[in-house]
Image (tube, helix red, strand yellow):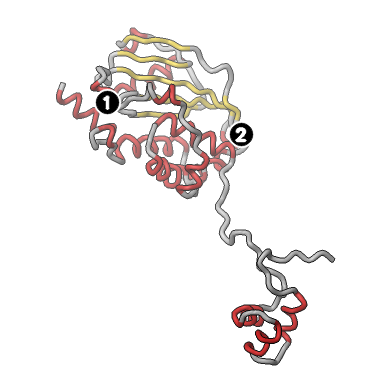
Amino acid sequence: MEIKLHANATTTPRIRRYLQESTRSDRELSAELGISVTTVRRWRKREQVSDNHTTPKVIHKALRQDQVVLINALRECLAVPLDDLLQLVNDGLGISVSRATLNRYLKPVAKERQGGMQRGIKALKAGRRPTHLVLHHLPLSLHMDDGGEQHLLWAREPVSGWCYARLYAGISPQLTSRWARDVMAACPADIQSAETIGLELSSAALGIALQHAPAPQRAVQVTVPLGEIIPRLNDEPVNQLLERICGFYNLGKAQKKLGDKTPQAFLDALRHND
């Protein structure tokens, strides 16, 4: 039988068993075998003669691939620092992960995209104003436990990062127009125009200039219940969770890039000054 010993081992299983069964003193055994007293005492205290396993006793939970995709999409959308993203993932989504593990799963942000991500005070200095919204429609094909076909509508004001999101079981021009009006009413900025991605909206109905972009080619497929990806959904409805996440981001933490203000406070201050 092949015996694998630690590279620095000074004893064999036969010597270790001899140490455990001997009635001689530690010092006598040390002198007899030419090993240290510490080694004698170590093996006399153990019951086995094999080396201890070197695998970690605490194994950090690995993220599912769909959780990795979700977290990276959230990071891309909100552009938050690592510590804020960690709080959002742990407390908001209910995904238990350490800071180091989360950082390991984050994909690098492309340099060409970083150049176009100026926000807050830097965006204001560059001449940009928070008067524009980006409105998204993302079709979802969910597990039947989550209702099958669903529609995620979410909005973002690019200068502050302010966001608003809801999930609907069906989609219609009336619903999207009502949702867009709700977004404009909730947003503290003076919105003058919007870009719609996958949405058909009327400029006349909203009273702002609109620029349309085509919808995604197909719905995002999710083959497992959402509760397996986002544990928090096992405790609260999806739209309640979306409201809470948006509230955390819009109102929860001040951001240095926004002059130590939250997105909501940043937009409120600009509108008041204007």
Disc 1 packing (10 Å; few <14; some 14–19; many ≥20):
some
Most extreme residue toward the left, as rendered?
273
Q: Quadrant of residue 244?
A: top left
- Sequence-first tag of 2 and 1: 1
The residue at 51%/42% (across/down) is: 104
Q: In which quarter of the image is residue 182?
A: top left
Q: Viewed as shown, does residue 137 lie left or right of 157?
A: right
Q: Label 2 sits on what residue type?
A: His
* On-image quarter of the C terminus: top left
Q: Is residue 80 above or below residue 90?
A: above
The residue where tag 2 is placed is 143
What percent of the width, then of the height, locates residue 27? Answer: 62, 88
Label drawn at residue 122: 1
Q: Viewed as shown, does residue 180 lie left or right of 213?
A: left
Q: Is residue 194 above or below residue 52?
A: above
Most extreme residue toward the right, as rendered?
1
